[in-house]
Image: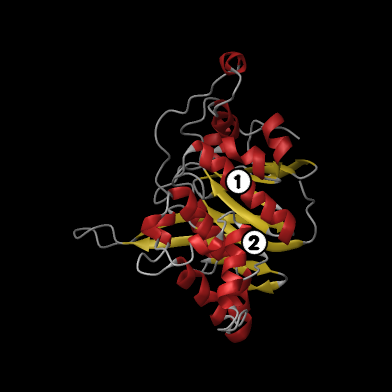
């Protein structure tokens, strides 16, 4: 694995609240606290995995980082520049330098355009290729992502490809502009297990060759240990634990992290039988009405009185390892 290097992206106190109508009879809008005071840092050539159940705020955090939505509070610094203050050419450069890989490759690609057209247009738009050389450049990019020989794929449409091939095309589109950061939102969850491994290996190889940084969003901890350097565990809009991947996996501190890890599939049946499983009961609460105190206390098997009334702060306990939990002393 690569080292952290200098931060390519820093998120400070990101907060996003949505106002939503409560219905026809009750006209008072409700406040949906999708993301609350989230701070993240991604080093150059580093992969940060943002982990949590559906509804925890992972995708909203990614949309804030990508500047697809504006924050209620906080800021995002990309290479030292405030992303939400960018205008004109600096914003255009940011759009080139930060790319995204979506969960569903079939929905992410225009079904009416060939692979060549899909990859050609961004290159021409950002001036990275001329009309005379763009076809050969697109072919080289397809070769890099394992679609070889490229001439077999250039003039075909998305409907002619398997799910794994389509995701390789999405990866090709993401790296074609030579970005510094790629936001990958559940990039392998829609793929078969064997294809997942191939895409993860491809992403790691591209990271080593091109010096990419990844924000890797997932609910599946089984893939995190293989690809991530850092892990941030998110629950109901809050970061509850973060740290180096080995520290999180070998010494998880927050009950939510321990619960997620306890149900992660392991290849050794004996180890699976021997480990203590923590089963979470009930659904994740609504961000429109989050619990008081610790947001996890309604599902936590170790809840104390303080958890119901006092919100724990994210505290640094060891090198890079932070946790927000009243149970953990230090």
Check disc 2 and report the residue beneath it. Answer: 11
Query: Could you say which is closer to the camera, residue 57 or residue 170?
Result: 170
Q: Could you say where residue 146 lies in the image, as x and y percent from the top left?
A: 59, 54
Query: Could you say which is closer to the camera, residue 40 or residue 225?
Result: 225
Check disc 1 and report the residue beneath it. Answer: 200
Q: Could you say where residue 48 lies in the image, as x and y percent from the top left?
A: 66, 50
**Secondary structure of residue under mark 1:** helix
Count of residue discs? 2
CA distance for labels 1 and 2: 25 Å
Note whether residue 198 is visible: yes
- Which-is-in-front pick, marks 1 and 2? 1
- Residue occupying image coordinates x 57% and y 37%: 221
Query: Could you say which is closer to the camera, residue 25 or residue 165?
Result: 165
- Residue occupying image coordinates x 49% and y 60%: 152
Q: Residues within 10 Å of mark 2 (few under 14, many from 20)?
A: many
Task: Decide: is 244 above or below 130.
Answer: above
- Residue occupying image coordinates x 68% and y 58%: 213
């Amino acid at each position: 694995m690569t080292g952290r290097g200098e931060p390519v992206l820093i998120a400070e106190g990101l907060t996003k609240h949505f106002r939503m109508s409560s219905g026809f009879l009750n006209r008072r809008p409700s406040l949906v606290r999708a993301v609350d005071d989230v701070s993240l840092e991604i080093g150059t050539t580093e992969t940060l995995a943002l982990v949590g159940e559906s509804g925890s705020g992972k995708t909203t955090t990614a949309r804030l980082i990508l500047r697809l939505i504006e924050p209620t509070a906080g800021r995002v610094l990309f290479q030292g520049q405030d992303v939400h203050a960018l205008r004109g050419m600096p914003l255009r450069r940011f759009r080139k330098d930060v790319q995204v890989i979506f969960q569903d490759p079939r929905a992410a690609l225009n079904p009416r355009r060939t692979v060549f057209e899909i990859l050609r247009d961004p290159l021409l738009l950002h001036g990275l290729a001329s009309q005379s050389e763009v076809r050969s450049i697109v072919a080289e990019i397809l070769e890099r992502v394992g679609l070889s020989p490229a001439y077999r794929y250039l003039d075909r449409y998305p409907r002619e490809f398997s799910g794994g091939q389509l995701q390789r095309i999405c990866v090709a589109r993401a790296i074609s502009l030579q970005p510094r950061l790629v936001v990958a939102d559940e990039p392998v969850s829609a793929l078969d297990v064997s294809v997942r491994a191939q895409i993860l290996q491809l992403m790691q190889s591209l990271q080593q060759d091109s010096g990419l940084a990844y924000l890797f969003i997932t609910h599946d901890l089984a893939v995190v240990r293989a690809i991530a350097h850092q892990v941030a565990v998110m629950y109901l809009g809050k970061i509850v634990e973060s740290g180096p991947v080995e520290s999180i996996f070998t010494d998880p501190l927050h009950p939510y992290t321990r619960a997620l890890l306890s149900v992660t599939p392991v290849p050794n049946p004996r180890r699976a039988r021997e480990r203590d499983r923590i089963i979470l009961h009930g659904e994740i609460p609504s961000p429109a009405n989050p619990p008081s105190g610790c947001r996890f206390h309604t599902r936590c098997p170790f809840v104390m009185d303080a958890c119901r009334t006092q919100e724990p702060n994210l505290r640094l306990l060891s090198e890079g390892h932070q946790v927000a939990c009243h149970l953990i002393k230090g």
